[in-house]
Image (cartoon, helix red, strand yellow):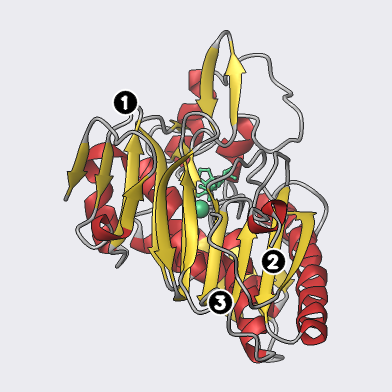
Amino acid sequence: MSMSRRNFLKTTLGVGIGAGMLGLGASLLPTTAAHAALTTREMYVFGTLVNLGAEGDTAQAQQALNTIEQRFLLMNRDWHAWKAGELSTLNSALAEGRSMAVSDDLASLLRGARDAAQASGDLFNPALGKLIALWDFQSDVQQRSAPPAAEEIAALCASAPRMSDLRIEIQADGCYMVSSRNPDVRIDLGGYAKGVALDWALDHLAAEDLHNAVVNLGGNLAIAGQRDGRPWHIGVRHPQGEGVIAAIDAQGREAVVTSGTYERYREWDGQRYPHIIDPRSGRPATHVVSATVIHADAAWADAAATALVVAGTQDWPEIAARMGITQVMVIDAEGGVGMTAVMAPRVSFVGARPARVEVV
Ligand code: AMP
Ligand code: MG
């Protein structure tokens, strides 16, 4: 296997489904030469580089990867936070106090996001699209020249849009109707939709009898089975610089999802404002710079990783426990690493060991 092939899960920067400029959260690390052929696909969707790989019959794998590629393009359109599609149509309706019939897929996505929001104590809060827009993260290029005024932030915090403001009801005709009792609810699924896409892709591959596979959405990785009879070897990006801070082996069905404040930020007057907003203050979360979660369900892992960045260095263990997440690695702004006891034995640091490593 060539070097570039072994390193095929590299990513670039871009802008897309609400998450915007995504750096590399995790990647596949080079391993010794593998014998089982891996059918791969690379595409640009969700504002990031997406890599797929599946062992097994090549024609069958190609066919499955085609289907996933098409589906990802539709998901990106339908669930985009600020470009025309089903979600932005719904957001317009909610802002005007109207209810709207939505597809089964969007209804199930919203219900899943609502459950995750509730479990996280609303630290994962995809109803805060208005705040995210206020901070200028819902645009491809920077629009503002300064952070928002304190009064604007305070007004949205006081209105406190939450997923629990949504009503998602099935009608007699089987259609779902969505309404909001708070007109300030604007849904932004940038912290969740990639996880849903990861789960969907692995489900589809399994249904097509492709049980050894990897899907990488800009550093959010989900794997199934093994690679050539051995675990998949995954690198977690160092929040400073481009290198890898830790290697993790994964097998079976697992998602390794990383939220990082280094991924996307705005700069005003020399100061960085990262893209993950603390719903309590209405301001960017800055204490945790990277949260990596391993969990069987990628959508839940995606929501949790975002929530743990918001939770901060003191509260992340409590929020992880509330969400039923047992495998977490958190890196703080000083480079200190915190891990759960279940995560610690899985993590091999690459290069210099971090100055402070705490297992909680
Ligand atoms: P992630 O990389 O999964 O942490 O997602 C980050 C993206 O989620 C941001 O670019 C926003 O679109 C959105 N977001 C920001 N803050 C929050 C939050 N507190 N809860 C849910 N989504 C958020
Ligand atoms: Mg997330």
Residue type beneath disc 2? Leu
Residue shown at 69%/66% (left/top)?
52
Residue 112 to residue 46: above or below: below
Please state, as top left, top right, bottom left or bottom right, where the N terminus lies in the image: bottom right
Q: Where does label 2 land, which residue? A: 52
* Label 3 packing within 10 angstroms: few (<14), some (14-19), many (20+): some
Residue type beneath disc 3? Asp
Residue 149: x and y, percent?
Answer: 54, 18
Q: CA distance from mark 3 to mark 1?
A: 38 Å
Q: CA distance from mark 3 to mark 2?
A: 16 Å
Q: Is residue 219 left or right of residue 234?
A: right
Residue type beneath disc 1? Glu
Is ligand 1 less than 8 Å from the beta carbon at label 1? no
Is ligand 1 less than 8 Å from the beta carbon at label 2? no
Nearest to the eye among marks 3 and 1: give it: 3
Residue shown at 32%/54% (left/top)?
347
Q: Quick one: 195 or 107, which is closer to the camera?
A: 195
